[in-house]
Amino acid sequence: MKHNVYIVDDHPLIVDALRTLINAGDNLQCIGTSDTIEKALEEIEKLQPDLVLIDIQLKQNQNGLQLLKKLRSVYPNLAVIILSMLTDDTFVDRAFKLGAMGYVFKEDTTTQIVEAIQTVIKGDYFVSSSQATRLLGHVYRNSQKEEKDPIDKLSNRELEVFLMIGDGMPIKEIAANMTLAASTIETLRSRIKSKLNIQDNEKLIRVAVEWKFTQPKTESI
């Protein structure tokens, strides 16, 4: 019996590679792909896959975590793995909170990606050994905090902007990176300042840099 896998990703070369990888497995087959949330929801309802692979950064500036949230509310038992270039622990942590059963980096080896799919298909959760170590530390640090981290107030899109500000990127560069208008990034920055109770852009930069500095460094696998 083959398990049906559906891919949501807007990079054609990656989609082709994943489809080939999945179809090479004795018990797996790729039954469809899409690059937007709307198409994914429509086809997943029709095809009823056993597992869905989702990239966070999708076409039309959509965020895959929003798709994950929608799928979890409609199909609570559907297995979902996030496959992304975003290696920051905050995204990994948020994905699992939203109901992902696995998180795989696009830089991971094909062996690890297949292992993730096979593990989640069985109903288990998957994290690589390096992720597990970092996540354990992240959970421990959070358990020591008396108050909720204010960063948790940020939306997924706001979090992306906040992290890039912490990397020292100016508004125009962030806009180009996210293929959004600079005015849109400025609006997101204003929302971030409001949620974090920060009055000026200089302080926001300091807070973002300091917050990034306190996070564990991500190591390549």
Image (tube, rainbow, N blue to C red):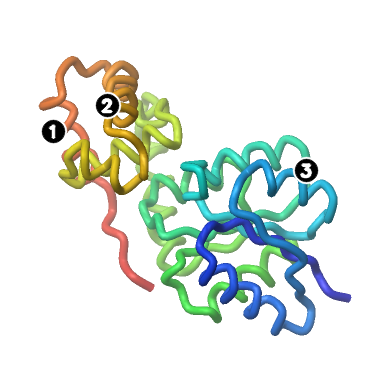
Query: Residue 32 or 137: which is nearer the viewer?
Result: 32
Is the residue under label 3 in contact with that under label 2 (CB below 8 Å)? Answer: no
Q: Earlier in the sequence, mark 2 or mark 1?
A: 2
Q: Which residue is mark 3?
A: 75
**In this rendering, position of residue 191 left or right of residue 46:** left
Left or right: residue 172 versus residue 6 is left
Give the number of the disc on residue 48.
none
Name the amino acid type tagged 1: Arg
Quadrant holding the N terminus: bottom right
Where is residue 5? Give x, y as percent: 73, 65
Which type of secondary structure does the marked residue at label 3 adopt?
loop
Residue at the limit of the structure toward the right, as seen here: 1
Q: Name the residue nearer the viewer: 123 or 110.
A: 110
* Sequence-first disc among 2 and 3: 3
User: What residue is at 52 percent from the left and 69 percent from the top?
Assistant: 14
Question: Of discs 2 and 3, which sits in the foreground?
Answer: 2
Look at the image and tell me whether residue 27 can be seen: yes
**Mark 2 nearby-residue class (10 Å; few <14, some 14–19, many ≥20):** some
Q: Secondary structure at mark 2?
A: helix
Q: Which mark is residue 186?
A: 2
Residue 40 image position (x, y, % from top left): 69, 49
